[in-house]
Amino acid sequence: MKWFAAALASMAALAGAVPLASAELGPLCGTGRNAAICFASVDRSGKLSYEQRAQLAAAAPVAIDIVGSRRFARELAAFHAAMPKRWVERNRYWRGFDPAEAPKTIRAAFAGLHIDTRGGARARRAARFGDNLAYEGSTDPRTGERFILLNRYRVDRPLEGLVATYVHEAAHKAGYSHRSGQTPDQKCEPPYVMAQLARKLADPEGWPSFAASKNACRFWRDMPDAL
Ligand SMILES: [Zn+2]
């Protein structure tokens, strides 16, 4: 399908506009009561193939709908309540966490967010060593546009992985944080936990094996099955 992507790119170049390519991807909005929440764009730099862009775009509505669902709010509150009390009290990233407020702030962070990509030597190294899949990005000081950056060499991932990445990075935008350094504790801090929960709802069948892996917060393994 290389010729098709090339044809599309030259058409876009002729039209002098990215919108042609974006329009082909379909809406980046949620559905139902989340229909008004929309990501702004995918891959503004146009460095990905059409298939890759379509893949990233397909995960956008799923992420919005999941975080906007009653089930996400309910399970997040249940997980938060079931975490070891002393551990939570001593963890500064959970301080002041309001499980009713968190999904709303992440939902709001999705709105108008650009899903950009990042290449270069550092991203290539991170991809090779299974390090950063994405970066928090920042806000364009001139336009006020907010963006996250996906590692360009790690975008070929299953839908639930992309959904988890969007939730994690949007959680940062919403002000949630975690410690650095890929520690086991880090996986139990708010951006990771909320991303894991979104992954669970996006891929219930794959969840048991993910929950048993080192990429999941260890507290999931002690939770009742209902969670
Ligand atoms: Zn992070």
Image (cartoon, rainbow, N blue to C red):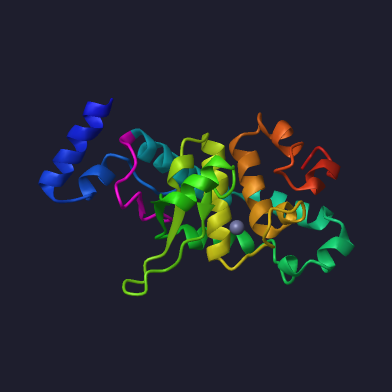
Please report the residue visible at 62 percent of the width from the left and 65 percent of the height from the top: 176
Please report the residue visible at 43 percent of the width from the left and 45 percent of the height from the top: 152
Asked if 138 appears above or below 83 in the picture, the reply is below
In-image side of 31 versus 49 (left or right): right
Please identify the residue farthest to the left as the structure is shown.
Answer: 14
Q: Is residue 224 magenta?
A: no
Residue 13 position in % (x across, y down): 15, 46
Asked if 16 appears above or below 2 in the picture, the reply is below
In-image side of 44 versus 220 (left or right): left
Main secondary-structure element of the magenta-colored stretch: loop
Q: Quadrant of residue 5?
A: top left
Q: Identify which residue, 103 or 120, lies in the foreground.
A: 120
Residue 173 position in % (x across, y down): 53, 64
In-image side of 36 versus 45 (left or right): right
Please report the residue visible at 62 percent of the width from the left and 41 percent of the height from the top: 199
Q: Look at the image and give the residue range highlighted in magenta.
A: 35-50
Q: Quadrant of the N terminus?
A: top left
Residue 10 position in % (x across, y down): 15, 39
